[in-house]
Amino acid sequence: MKIRRIVVGLDVAPHSRPALEAAAALAGALDADLEALFVESDEVHRLAGLPFARELGVSSAAARPMDPAVLERTLRAHAREARRALAEVAAPRSLRWSLRVTRGSVTEEIIAASTGADLTVVGARRWTPEAARFARGAPATIIVLPHSGRLGGPVAAICPVTVAPEHAMALAASLGDALGGGLTILVLAEDLAEAGAWCEKAGDLLRAMGRRAGLEIVRESQPEALQAALERLAPRAVAVVAAPPAQSS
């Protein structure tokens, strides 16, 4: 499977930089184009327009009214810093890259930008049910980095049985080449017989490719079981597998 386009979502949150570095490393390993999306949050803009909104000075800890004009300048500065950081991580790897600045809901903008992408990389403070719902709603495979953002080490791939085993195993092989470390595939299904047949076919494909990966079945109606599995595995990254772009509706 050829991964041609990787999207990384950026905003002002501190975990954006590790996500950018991880996405650049993936793009370099897979010879893929890297597209960064810097999102100016609508929520922050709305907050700045409220008459009672206040912000605290970093050094003084003094409260002062939020100024929409100051916010605009601050966000533009963050966007310039995102471009500088993108160029900095792309240059040593000779990456083909682009940056797009947009305004709206961070979640919705990243999901929209994922359409047609092969992979989308996002950072998170930790893996949560909210992160799971966000990732499952994306039209492309999403890699969530709930830890430091460093690549390498164990990876968990969450894969619904609605995704063809051929696609899922080809993607797993590509990620395994790029990331190294162990790989566990958490197969989401409600029908255990269907899940068993999926795992049997996936196992045959892995053996034919000379690959190894753990396969575990998790009931789709039991999100707490999925959460428990991820806490037990403690992966460096979580990939939520989607159908390839050509099959997406």
Image: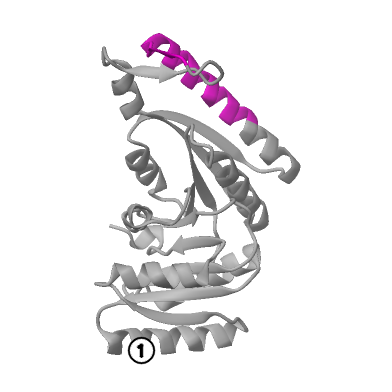
Q: Quadrant of the C terminus?
A: bottom left
Q: Answer with left or right where residue 96 lies relative to residue 46.
A: right
Whether residue 157 is visible here, answered yes or no, is no
The residue lying toward the viewer, choosing from 164 and 150, is 150
> Percent position (x, y) of residue 166?
45, 76
> Percent position (x, y) of residue 62?
46, 14
SS class, disc 1: helix
Q: Quadrant of the N terminus?
A: bottom right
The residue lying toward the viewer, choosing from 123 and 85, is 123
* Residue 212 picture quarter: bottom right
16 relative to 196, above or below: above
Q: Which residue is mark 1?
A: 197
Q: Residue at x 61, y 54 (%)?
A: 26
Residue that lies at the very extreme toward the right in this rendered image = 92
90 relative to 221, above or below: above
How is this picture coloured?
one colour
The residue lying toward the viewer, choosing from 245 and 140, is 140
168 relative to 142, above or below: below
- The segment highlighted magenta reads 62-84
> Percent position (x, y) of residue 54?
36, 17
Q: Residue at x 64, y 28 (%)?
A: 84
> Percent position (x, y) of residue 149?
59, 51
* Residue 175 picture quarter: bottom right
**Is residue 66 inside the magenta stretch?**
yes
User: Dot 1: few (<14), some (14–19), or many (≥20) neighbours within 10 Å?
Assistant: few
27 relative to 158, above or below: above
**Is residue 214 inside the magenta stretch?**
no
Residue that lies at the very extreme toward the front in this rendered image = 61
Whether residue 52 is visible here, answered yes or no, is yes
Which amino acid is tagged 1?
Ala
Q: Residue at x 41, y 62 (%)?
A: 244
